[in-house]
Each structure stands twice: as structure tokens, then as C-alpha cells.
Image: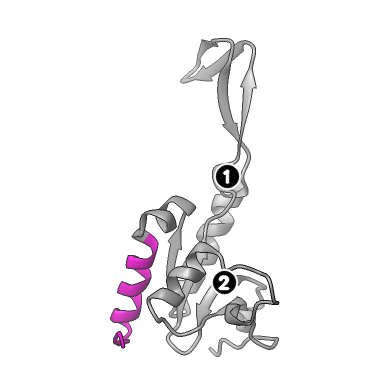
Amino acid sequence: MATTSMKQPRLFALKPHGKEHTPIEELILAHKLPLPEQEYRFAVSIGRDWRFDYCWPDLKIAFEQEGGGFGRYIVVEGGHERRRGQSIPLKPGTAIRVGGRHNTGEGMQEDAIKYSYAAILGWMVVRATTTMIRDGVAIELLLAAFRARGWREA
């Protein structure tokens, strides 16, 4: 099955004047990786409108930054939490993390389907959190993916 983009590729190196690169873009540039396409539609051939944050279609490598996965904090003044059928009191000032599409059952299921189809269609998908990008883990994984596809550093 062909994986074709339905629009002109957007290369992050072509950002409008005055815009800074994101941390992962800075790492991609620093490690002299080929320029990726952004928001690439990869499953058009099976009738889906899924997109990769960054991808290299010729190598079938994609990078997904899992943003918003950690949700936000709500501080409660009191209440109870249910765990394994038991009611556990919450202390005043307890911070609870809520939200983030990737943390919901439906969001996790949709992600699982998306990434499973990506693998079925032959894509190597590197997924990373902001912390992984900051700590250098994400770029090491991305470099490993490139090496596995035969890419050699300049």
C-alpha cells in the first residue's frame, strides 16, 4: 500500500522569520539528520486521517512527541479517592493530575490503533515525551531508528 501525503510537505527548516525551533527540531538539526516532513498523513490508503508529528517518508521513520499526556494539576481541599473498592481520604492541598488525551481510555485506545497500523504499514515510530527530549533519550532513539534503516552519520 502506498503512503502518500495529500499536501505539500512542510519542512521545519522553513519556519517564518522570528520563529524558533522546538527542542526536538534543534536536536534534529544538531545531529544533521535529514529534514523531516511535518503533519504527514500516513494511512490515507486505508481511509484514515492519521498524521505523524515529524516523519521521513523515504525511510518510513516517524517521530511522535507525546504532548499533553501529563494533563494538569488540580489542588483539592478535601474529599476521598476510591482504590480497589476502598475510600481513601485526601488531605487538604492534595494535587491531582487530570486530563490529557493520551491518559484517557479512549485516547490510549486510539493511539494503540494508530501505532499498530503504522507498524503494519511498515513505519518505525519513535515516541517520546518532553522529558525524553530534554534528557537526550529521544534523539538517541531517533538516531538508532535511522541507523537501523541504513542511514550513516556525516
In the rendered image, the quadrant that contains the C terminus is bottom left
Residue 144 is covered by the magenta coloring: yes
Q: Earlier in the sequence, mark 2 or mark 1?
A: 2
Residue 7 is covered by the magenta coloring: no
The label number, if any, that marks residue 105 in the structure image: 1
Q: Which residues are magenta?
A: 138-154
Q: Visible in this render: residue 124?
A: no
- Please provide percent x and percent y for residue 36: 52, 81
Q: Is residue 141 above or below residue 110?
A: below
- Please provide percent x and percent y for residue 12: 59, 77
| Helix, strand or loop at mark 1 | helix
The label number, if any, that marks residue 52 in the structure image: 2
Residue at 54 percent across and 10 percent down: it is: 91
**Residue 61: which quarter of the image?**
bottom left
Residue 148 relative to residue 117: left or right: left
- Please provide percent x and percent y for residue 136: 36, 59
Q: Is residue 80 above or below residue 18?
A: above
Residue 20 relative to residue 151: left or right: right
Q: Amino acid at mark 2?
A: Phe
Q: Amino acid at mark 1?
A: Gly
Q: In terms of secondary structure, what is the magenta stretch mainly?
A: helix
Residue at 43 percent across and 69 percent down: it is: 27
- Please provide percent x and percent y for residue 85: 50, 17
